[in-house]
Amino acid sequence: MFTKPTNLGPDVAIEKSGILGYLMGWKGASGHGSASTAMEVMSSVDARGKEVLIVGGLSPVALEVAYALLSRGARVVLACRETEKGKSEAQKLRSDNPSAQVAVMHCDLSTLAGAMAFVEAFKVWKGWRVEGGECKALQSAHGVDFIDGMEEGPTNNYATKRTFGRPDSEIRVLLETATLSCCAPSCPRSYSQTVDLFACHQVWLQLEENQIPNKMVWIQLEEKRIPYRMVTVEMGAYGEKAAWFLEKNPKGLIPVVELDGEVVTESAAIMAVLEAKFPEHNPLIPPEGSEEKKTYDEMMTLVDSPMYSTWSKWIANTIPEEKDAARKAFEDLVDVAEAKLAKLGGPFFLGEMFSLVDVNLIPSFERMVASSLYFKGLNMREGTRWPNLARWYEAMDNRDSYLGTKGDYYTDMDPAGERFANVIDGEEGNSWKLPLSPLSATSFPEPYAREEDPVVHRLEAAAALIRNSGPIARFALRGPGKPGPKEYMCPLADPQAIPALEYEAAMDVALRHVAHALLASMGGSGMPSATIIEACEYLNTRIGVPRDMRMPAARQLRAHINWAADMMGSS
């Protein structure tokens, strides 16, 4: 029986029951009728803990229902053909409800094969929800958020934007960059075909084939706390540059910053513009005419010194009778940097003031430190010959802006090296295996300035794995798959490789074992498969720092992937 709406006149006489009553919008026993909105229907419903799948999720009615369900605490999956449009609509839903949990899945019901593919994909998604929920709860318990809470706080490579507590309307800088690591294009280790592998976002900033300027501009923005967005761009050494980027910047040069709509290229020019346009944001250059500015100009001569090229020649030198002279030439130039640091007492090149001198030098020094140990066994951080440099490294490691952008030694290096290479590459049997040795500022061969928190770092690794599990599984299966038709400069780069997708379900199970082990410390059972072991090894060698996660989290993930592979191998 339907109740007559109050907006009808007293003379209206229509049967209050049946289809006519429904079409007229009269309310039934539930208190709702055809004129009721989704929000009205859901007003008294507690949907927390519920998961709702909406097929045809882009229709106006579906989006209204999704909005209402999300407002009542439900987790919603929008199943649709146009996934990019779906992601846009999902973002709109989140803009009104920041805590909304909404996912988008491709669903084409026009064929039986499409329907079956969606069912299988949904099963996988449902499976990962268990680990995802546990990971979210543990992050909350430990006061961290590696998924939604990265716009503020320490420097990281997870956020789509950095606001530093300011409204979005104050974001004037669009930063377009390549994969965020410290290695130059000559480094065959890089991993650009895995851009956004562990990320479910894109970042605005564009970087040239030499990635070192990327770190410089990134650190500057973080130190000055200038609100910005970033987006990643493929580097020519590892894949084809995107058409949208070349249309905007025909030469394809990076870094690129768009400031108030104006495109600026080349790192030195970008950094000068940022200092000029944002003088109120923590100046990193002393005032013109000051004695400090004269010292700054003197220290900046190190940036243009031949130290980096001399280091490159020494590292690449294979002629025995020239090795000693090449090493001495490099060490003599490092002595010059040591003397300049000693001049003002450190810890930075301008004494107590952190400046663009430090920003310009740290990317090249980072790589020199890693490769000198990796190839030649020279520990530049040891502190005996260069105590002021060791103190500078320590001071840099304790700055959030650098620690969040810093690569690990493995990401920096060529796969073929000497001396400590097998330790850095995780091939000596222990460094990438559980249980991991403690990590500290005195760890060898690779130190880490902050106190390690294994539980939190395992959570970070698990969050990175869980939030993008599908693409990670498919990427790993390139290992046992077929190589792409084109070779790129970097041996680990194969963006056109064909993954062995017939093993996707098995790879998914293996990664869930890894996620569970990260969350539960240990546990799981073996799953024999030489193919999946090969995929695990392929994935492990392409985890990049800081692009995918910070160094302590990366070592946890690498070790847990090896744990899963070992269990499968012993089954």
Image (cartoon, rainbow, N blue to C red):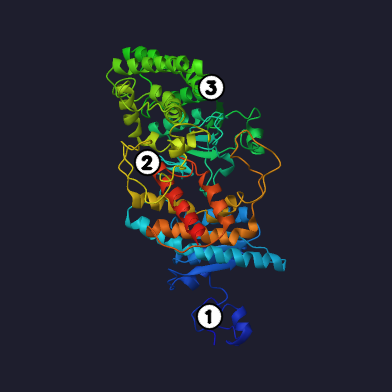
Give the mark toward the camera: 1 or 3. 3
Quadrant in which the N terminus appears: bottom right
| Residue at left offset 54%, top offset 45% | 196
Q: Mark 1 to mark 2: distance in Å? A: 54 Å
Residue that carries the numbered disc 1 in the rendered image: 27
Q: Which picture quadrant has residue 517? A: bottom left
Up the image or down, 264 lies above or below 296; here it is below
Residue that carries the numbered disc 3 in the rendered image: 318
What's the mark number on residue 154? Answer: 2
| Residue at left offset 63%, top offset 65% | 118
Label 2: few (<14), some or many (≥20) within 10 Å? some
Q: Measured from the top left, where is residue 234 in percent x and y?
A: 60, 37
Q: Amino acid at mark 3?
A: Thr
Q: Measured from the top left, where is residue 453 in percent x and y?
A: 32, 48
Q: Is residue 560 visible?
A: yes
Q: Considering only order in the chain, which callout, 2 or 1, is on the residue closer to the N terminus? A: 1
What's the mark number on residue 173? Answer: none
Q: Which picture quadrant has residue 361? A: top left
Helix, strand or loop at mark 2: loop
Up the image or down, 294 lies above or below 506; here it is above
